[in-house]
Image (cartoon, helix red, strand yellow):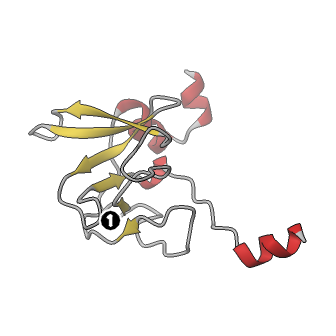
Amino acid sequence: MSNWQKKLTPEQYVVTREKGTEVPFSGIYLNHNEVGISEAKYDAGAGWPSFFEAHGTWEKDESHASIVRRPDNSLGSTGTEVICKHCDAHLGHVFDDGPDPTGQRFCINSVALNFKPRKNNVEQSDKES
């Protein structure tokens, strides 16, 4: 058994290490509406959590984002796979049919995500005073 198999659930392993995918409309973060660190999430109706840009993107510059893009033909046509820059995990795919301001639709598997709630700026300011 690999280290990844020891650290991940079977579904996480299949999706992130073997380039699988969740069953559409089944992921825990699809209809999750709590505000997190990304302001780019939207409802694409595609069956997976969708974002119009990668977290860490600044003015269309993805150099500080934690993803890389790779060409992928596994969907029956040329597409773009989204991979974790740090561990080479398959996260999902990005398409050019998203909303403004980017026109991008990142479809990311819930099992590849870890929700982090946004810290309340008012509470944070009070703690720093």
Looking at the picture, how far across and down is residue 108, in whole percent?
37, 52
Q: Is residue 40 left or right of residue 127?
A: left
Looking at the picture, how far across and down is residue 99, in whole percent?
25, 67
**Neighbour tally class for label 1: few under 14, some 14-19, many 20 plus, Cα within 10 Å:** some
Q: Residue at x 69, y 68 (%)?
A: 119
Looking at the picture, how far across and down is residue 70, in whole percent?
28, 31
Q: Indicate the amino acid at tag 1.
A: Phe
Looking at the picture, how far across and down is residue 105, in whole percent?
27, 57
Residue 127 or residue 70, whichever sits in front: 127
Say if 15 sits above or below 30 in the image: above
* Quadrant in the rendering for residue 36: bottom right
Helix, strand or loop at disc 1? loop
Q: Residue at x 32, y 54 (%)?
A: 107
Q: Residue furthest right?
A: 129
Q: Residue at x 29, y 65 (%)?
A: 101
Say if 52 sits above or below 109 in the image: below
* Quadrant in the rendering for residue 8: top right
Query: Residue tagged by mark 1?
Result: 25
Which quarter of the rendered picture does the C terminus lie within? bottom right
Residue 104 or residue 8, whichever sits in front: 104
